[in-house]
Amino acid sequence: MKRGLLLPLLKGEQSLLMLHSSCFSAITSPAIANLTSSSSSSPPSSFRLSCAATSMATTVQEQKKALRSEIRKALKALSPQQRAHEDFVIQSTILSSSWFESSQRLCAYISCPSLREVDTSTILSQVLTKPDSEHQVQTQKELYVPRVEDKNSNMRMLKITTMDDLVANSMNILEPSPLDGSGNQREDVMSTTNPVDLFLLPGKRNFKFKLSLCFICFSFCLSLNIANYYYYAGVCFDKEGRRLGRGGGYYDVLLKRYQDLALEKKWNKPLLVALAYSVQIKDEGVIPVTPTDMPIDAIVSSDGVIPISPIAKEKMS
Ligand SMILES: Nc1nc2c(c(=O)[nH]1)N(C=O)[C@@H](CNc1ccc(C(=O)N[C@@H](CCC(=O)O)C(=O)O)cc1)CN2
Ligand SMILES: Nc1ncnc2c1ncn2[C@@H]1O[C@H](COP(=O)(O)OP(=O)(O)OP(=O)(O)O)[C@@H](O)[C@H]1O
């Protein structure tokens, strides 16, 4: 079946099946259910389908909004103890994994407690800690973190070498200043000569660590070659790779631009890994998607790693 088709789907109540990228999403919609409900005066199904398609954009946005609100409530209801437990297990799972260990360049979010995002502070502090050359064989990873440039979905991923590179923005999210301490433009992940391996998706947390002077020798990083993973910010995810973000389009736009760049440069695609509390993992068919929504490769939750794409199954199983 081709992408972008709309098919009627019977699943208890009337809903729409939307084909998108490699994944399908069943979108339950009261508005569309009304359009397609049978009555003696109802128009032919082709007309009803076209009406549904026309109202699709609005309907999907409404569905997304409702789901975001539901997840926000579920996150609020999590006890601090449960959150701390899940934060610990998720970060430990990542830090002890071979796919994280072998990553050389990564993009990650700076977790934000008020947004109730999975904590990334332990991961980031470890990434930013300069390896002890006597005892550690591990090489220093290069780290890029988000900086929102404007309200038109423009976000950059800039390289940092210490948490002191970050300042709070108007949303109280920590992000890098455009210039480094020497007044030079920070390296943008879109203009590096080497690819990213890992992308961890969003937050800001209480960084207990003051990682300052020890990162000056980042010239060591120049010997690194590949950044292949991204850790993702999101509101919820499903086990088929669908992701619902905060609604800014920041990640979708950036990931599309990065994928186009990787294609042009003939680089491997980065692994897109979402960090999720249990309440952020939804059943199939619940998350509405549109053609610009970028699917994820894997989820890490307190229950472990869920590899989704073939590449994630190969690297993370
Ligand atoms: N830690 C972190 N950094 C990030 C993101 C993120 O989600 N988390 N972003 C990812 O895009 C970008 C910033 N975008 C953001 C978009 C919305 C909200 C926010 O506060 N949303 C509210 C709802 C606002 C509303 O409904 O009007 C919320 O989610 O509660 C925060 C950041 C870049 N940096
Ligand atoms: N690649 C893209 N190019 C242009 N516009 C885009 C792209 N991706 C998303 N958008 C637009 O951004 C807006 C927000 O999209 P959506 O609701 O899917 O955000 P989201 O996935 O929740 O947010 P985010 O990507 O920041 O996590 C929509 O108007 C959408 O059309």
Image (cartoon, helix red, strand yellow):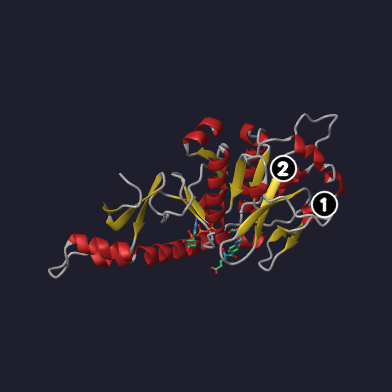
- For the residue pair 310 and 157, the one nearer the viewer reads as 157
Cβ of disc 2 within 8 Å of ligand 1?
no
| Crowd rating for badge 2 (residues with CA inside 10 Å; few <14, some 14–19, many 20+) | many
Residue 163 visible within the image: yes
User: Residue 141, located in which quarter of the rendered image?
Assistant: top right
Q: Furthest-front residue in view?
A: 264
| Crowd rating for badge 1 (residues with CA inside 10 Å; few <14, some 14–19, many 20+) | few
Residue at left 63%, top 34%?
97
Counting from the top left corner in percent of width and height, residue 290 is at 42, 56
Give the amino acid at mark 2: Glu
Give the amino acid at mark 1: Lys
Left or right relative to 244: residue 191: right
Residue at left 53%, top 46%?
260
Left or right relative to 197: residue 20: left
Instruction: Give the labeled residue for mark 2.
Output: 142
Residue at left 78%, top 55%?
165
Tell me the CA gap for discs 2 and 1.
18 Å
Q: Which mark is residue 284?
A: none
SS class of the residue under badge 2? Answer: strand
SS class of the residue under badge 1? Answer: loop
Cβ of disc 1 within 8 Å of ligand 1?
no
- For the residue pair 48 and 203, the one nearer the viewer reads as 48
- Earlier-in-chain disc, 2 versus 1: 2
Instruction: Give the labeled residue for mark 1.
Output: 210
Counting from the top left corner in percent of width and height, residue 301 is at 56, 45
Counting from the top left corner in percent of width and height, residue 123 is at 70, 44
Whether 296 is drawn above or below 203: the answer is above
User: Residue 268, located in which quarter of the rendered image?
Assistant: top right
